[in-house]
Image (spheres, rainbow, N blue to C red):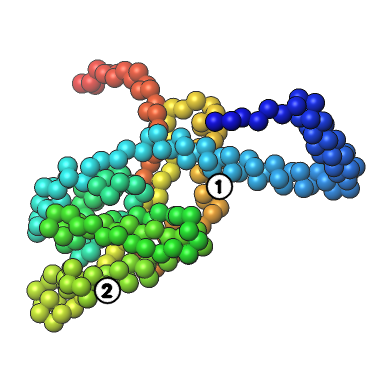
Amino acid sequence: MIRKKWNPAVIISLALIFLTVESAFLIANLEKFPHGGYITLGIGGLLVALMYIMIKAKIIGRKYVEMVKLKNYETLIKQLSGDESIPKYSTHLVFMTGAERNDEIEEKIVHSIFQKQPKRADIYWFIHVNTVEEPYRADYEVTHFYEEDVIRIDFSLGFRVQPRISQMFRQVVEDMVLNKDIDITSRYQSLNQNKVVGDFRFVVIQKYLSYDNQLPLFQRVILNAYFSIKKLSLSEPKAYGLDSSNVLVEKFPLVFSQAKQVPLRRVIRNKQP
């Protein structure tokens, strides 16, 4: 490999020219500051601060989000789905998931299905939305688990495509029905005989910062600012384009670092005769 050697004098001369031109622009713009330039600088600084908070908070959050393997819950999902002692929550239960791997889900989703309120359904769906660089790309991939008791859909959408998940999900289901990949008829006997389509219900888990956290000051400031900004932004159902008539929003506390237990001491008083 042949490398060209530049004359140091040429490099220094070019650097001085660029520095002189940029310095001239800087000096010219500094004169405008007393006439409103500080407002522009303030707005720019605010935008930079907001971007930093959003990026930093997501980096911190990824360290503590626990993913679990779907295969570890195969038996439990089948047992829950067939447990008639639990009232059926929905025929089709749909969760939005941020798990990149299609064989994983967030631990908080497992908690929602089995512990917060047992959610018995005939078919469980998991939807993941991946934003790609191609501006108008709109693809999807379907993965079946557990004899079609669990189905995952991965959407790959360009950054110029509005994520209307309710509409897109309906299109995917219709396509799967035409290809005989799934039967969406209600599992209730009376409705099944009349070919009535089963109901669909979306569950969106909304995270919030738990009071049980014990975080360093910097992380606490960043996360508090992040969740304050999220309150002012679009809700997750609206951001995904979900129809609010069949969406359940569940609150889930994020515990990044468990606070130390307070050393409590039980006081036993003598009983009065």
Q: In this view, does 47 lie above or below 249?
A: above
- Label 2 sits on a secondary structure element that is helix
Residue where numbered disc 2 is placed: 174
Q: What residue type is labelled 1?
A: Ile
Image quarter for residue 267? top left
At 12% from the left and 76% from the top, the residue drawn is: 192
Question: In the image, residue 231 lies at what x, y percent?
Answer: 52, 50
Image quadrant containing the C terminus: top left
Question: In the image, residue 249 lies at what x, y percent?
Answer: 37, 56
Q: What is the distance, in whole Å, between disc 2 and disc 1 at their CAs?
A: 37 Å
| Residue 206 placement, left or right of 116 | right
Numbered circle sitting on residue 173:
none
- Label 1 sits on a secondary structure element that is helix
Q: Is residue 90 above or below residue 27?
A: below
At 20% from the left and 57% from the top, the residue drawn is: 144
Q: Can residue 249 be spotted in the picture?
A: no
The crowding category of the residue bearing disc 1, from other C-alpha atoms within 10 Å (few below 14, some 14 to 19, many at least 20), is some
Numbered circle sitting on residue 229:
1
Q: How many marks?
A: 2
Question: In the image, residue 103 lies at what x, y percent?
Answer: 24, 47
| Residue situated in front as seen by the camera: 89 or 13 | 13
| Residue situated in front as seen by the camera: 244 or 9 | 9
Question: In the image, residue 146 lies at what x, y percent?
Answer: 14, 54
| Residue 173 placement, left or right of 223 | left
